[in-house]
Amino acid sequence: MRKNKVTIVLVGIIAILAISLAVTFAVTRSNSKKRQSGYYYIDLDGNVVSGAFDKESRPGIYGECYFDEHGIAKISKKNGENTTFDDEIYFIDTNFKVIGNRIFTYGNVLEWEYDNQVYFLCREGNDFQILDSNMNLVSSIEDYFFDDSKLIACVSHRLAKGLIPICSKESNYEKMGYIDINCNYAIEPKFCYCIEFSDDDLAIVRAESGKKGVIDKTGKYVIEPIYFDITSFSQGVAMAQETENGGARLIDKTGKLVSEETFLFDGLYDSSDKLFNEKYTYAVGYEIREMGFIDKAGKFAIKLDKREGSFSGGYADVEDENGKYGFIDENGNLAIPCQYDDLIGFTDDGIAPVKVGDLWGYIRTDNTWFLEPQFDEAYTFRNGYAYVWLNEDQQIKK
């Protein structure tokens, strides 16, 4: 009898220990699944694929956080100060690792593409440096005391390519030219201002006369500096304005007028703008202030009653009289009804963020849900990833 009691006690102890271990394992496993609040990357299957980025790593106005075609994303992190130029900048790869473990101050680094390879242009102390895709030094200019704006102003805030526009140290930073990846001049500094080359291998420069023209990769003028302002070329055309506050016309790569139609320039375009990233670009008539989307022949393909969004991924966002948003297609037809409280454009991934009430979700081009509204913040899918805010322990509902 005594032996049976001992056995029962032992069995009870073992049972208690087993239950305790099971509970401990369950709690540990549950805790391992807990998610802290922050920004995360999700993939095209709707899965969370990165660790958390804190609330200070908020997407910036220039598209920070988007992955480019090289699988690199720029993260901009607020550094506790009021000005953007105190922000920290770093780059991550698709493993969500900081490239080279390098962190920069905003305005001191740019991603660059040269001969289809990734490089980074940066300031390190008093030197201008060119780094490779692993943040290793390739070349530099010592004691280069450039103003941030003289480097940043020369390029758009997307991934830039080709020869690098730079102020000449020898000219006391008054003249600009272009260097190659070894910091050797490919085009001698003789311009008052210049920007990066477009996909058409042409660049906008300003001569001493104050007028702007267009050069090729040898530095030769293909369009003489006769314009007050001009956009970058895209798909063989650019918008050029002859006089300040005057009308602008479309020209081809030889400077020949594409059409006689005149358009408003001021406030709509600047030199780094590429008009025809897609089939149409937004324009406003100069004499008759009609507005809408024009084709590369300068003809209005879609006329609008008010300013709408740009085409992206084959669709442009529109707003109805009730303040709701939808999308039109390239024929000007309402492809997705105006039923959303806010939205961001489609990209080549075929998915767009839309807002219903206070929450964001994602739709496909046929207006079906990819992910139903559930995010406090959600940003565009590009090259397979999107940046979203997830609250503590929030699980994605697919």
Image: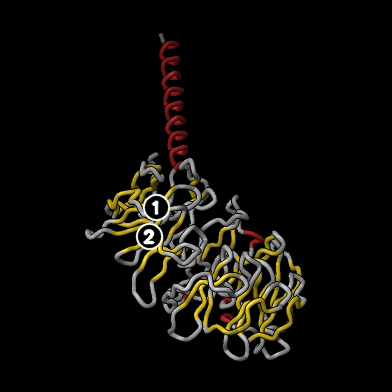
Residue type (three-letter) at the residue carrying disc 1 = Asn
Observer-nearest of 33 and 22: 33
Q: Amino acid at mark 2?
A: Ile
Q: Is residue 218 found left or right of 198 in the rendered image?
A: right
Q: Regarding mark 2 in the picture, which secondary structure is present there?
A: strand
**Horizontal side, residue 225 vs residue 266: left or right:** right
Q: Quadrant of the N terminus?
A: top left
Outermost residue on the top side: it is 1
The answer to whether the residue labelled 2 contacts the one labelled 1, judged by CB atoms less than 8 Å apart, is yes
Q: What is the x, y in percent for residue 58? A: 45, 63
Residue found at the very far front of the displayed protein? 260
Q: Is residue 146 left or right of residue 261?
A: right
- Res 194 → quadrant: bottom right
Residue at 34% x, 51% y is: 333
Q: Which mark is residue 304?
A: none
Q: In the rendered picture of this protein, how many numbered marks are placed on residues?
A: 2
Residue where numbered disc 2 is placed:
302
Q: Which residue is labeled 1 in the image?
A: 331
The residue shown at (76%, 68%) is: 138
CA gap between label 2 and label 1 equals 7 Å
Q: Secondary structure at mark 1?
A: loop
| Residue 223, percent from left and from top | 63, 78
User: Please, is residue 203 above or below residue 337 in the view?
Assistant: below
Percent x, y of residue 342 = 32, 57
> In this view of the protein, which residue sits in the foreground, 109 or 314?
314
